[in-house]
Amino acid sequence: MSTINVIEPATERVLDTLETTDVAELDAVVARAAKAQKLWAAESPQYRGQVLLAVAAAIEANSEHLARLESRNVGMPITEARGAVAGAAATFRYYAAAPERLLGHTIPVDGGVDMTFREPIGVVGLITPWNYPLTIASWKVAPGLAAGNAIVLKPAELTPLTARELAAIATAAGLPEGLLTVLVGPGRTIGRAMVEHPGIGKIAFTGSTEVGKDIAQRAAGTLKRVTLELGGKSAALVFADADLDAAASGLTGAVFGNSGQDCCARSRVFVERPALEAFLEKLEKVVGGIVVGDPLNESTQMGPLVSAGQKERVRAYVDGAPVLFRGVAPEGPGYWVPPTVLHPIDDRHPAAREEIFGPVVSVFAFDSEQEALARANDTVYGLAGSIWTSDAARSLRVARAVDAGALAVNSYTSVRITTPFGGFKQSGLGRELGPDALDAYTEVKNVFFSTTG
């Protein structure tokens, strides 16, 4: 059996060594999951809700352990990791109410009664990314289980540790055996086998657009349902009447949070020309004040990138680009890249068009609302975005005109557990979170009941 070494990004040392899942094991895994799913779906909604509540409580009981593991495996600052763990518990708690609220409809028809039911898909395959391992696993596992499915979860090869802990914690909390199985290994082997396996009825994937397209093509062979949450090159539009202090300081989290390894990162910032100089002055102070260092240090605001390969990828975008200013990062072991601001930069520059997935932001000037919208929408992506202005009418007008699925006015937030999340264009298919997520893990069944004699 082969193994993988899990590397700690801040030290470049081996954090753990795990056995990988052989593709030959997948048939047995899916068979066990299918058997467990039938029993789970037959349980009362109240029971399933109680189990999900118990999982939420167990996550909270193990919160510090999970946070430190996430911090060390990803390089995420410990304060962010604690928030991620709290969010995972809240996600399970939110979906614990769902089994009793999978409502159908009665539809007026001639000669009888017509009704709809939301039925589970069966065995669902989840493929999650390395940037927010526990968070995004919870976004998929919780609604999938709430809808009555069994889950086969493959976390990213770089960051599998908290997914494995989640499965162990959930089982100890009372989740029946076989309902949540974690597979370890590369996407090109075990992940591809999941996508093509005839016993898996749906794939939910978060990752790059390139891989998402490949998954969609392979899933078509068995007409699998797919949810794809893919890449982004999200824009922030900062008008001259905006609160420039808030717009600049908010970028600490919006583009430099988790070292910029966030598909919603506002990596393109368009500033109305009269406010540009003042905005850049404020942003320079913000960037200079970001504490980059040991993720386990309570004062750290930004850690390392996740891997040596990701560090080289980000540096390739920055080398030769117009760097206006940058922050400070540690020397020595660790995959460190300082927070970096590019300006002036052409809209066609690769750093301005492609998803970097690192702590790099491009700042542009614009002269009119129409120009800002045209340039913000000139991308294959459409995941998130922000509008900064004190003009309420303009904020709604611009929000309706931006081609993106998750927008915020005078804020950089993109995600709430209770609201739908997903993208336009090549940023993906379907929606996660909120009540909409349950649609993605169920099928609609229509039943006509004749009342004629």
Image (cartoon, rainbow, N blue to C red):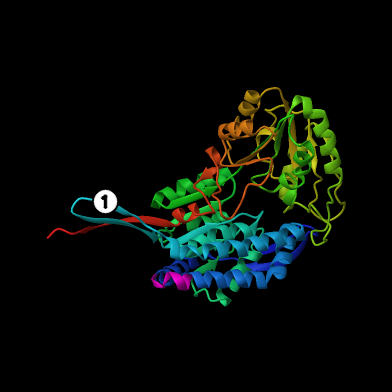
**Quick one: SS at disc 1?**
strand
The vertical placement of 307 against 18, above or below, is: above
Q: Is residue 1 visible?
A: no
**Among all residues in the image, which is located at the extreme left?**
453
Q: Is residue 386 visible?
A: yes
Identify which residue is drawn at 51% across, 46% down.
214
The verdict on residue 8 being magenta is no
Q: Point out residue 325 in the picture as x, y percentages from the top left corner.
A: 84, 36
The magenta segment is 42-48
Q: Residues within 10 Å of mark 1 (few under 14, many from 20)?
A: few
Q: Point out residue 182 in the picture as x, y percentages from the top left corner.
A: 56, 66
Q: Quadrant of the N terminus?
A: bottom right
- The quadrant holding residue 319 is top right
Identify which residue, 14 or 339, lies in the foreground.
339
Amino acid on which the number 1 mark rests in the picture? Pro
Identify which residue is drawn at 71% across, 22% down.
367
- With 249 as the anchor, is 427 left or right in this view? left
Q: Quadrant of the C terminus?
A: bottom left
The verdict on residue 47 being magenta is yes
Q: Main secondary structure of the magenta part?
A: helix
Q: Point out residue 155 in the picture as x, y percentages from the top left corner.
A: 59, 60
Task: Write down the residue under mark 1.
Answer: 108
Identify which residue, 207 or 334, lies in the foreground.
207
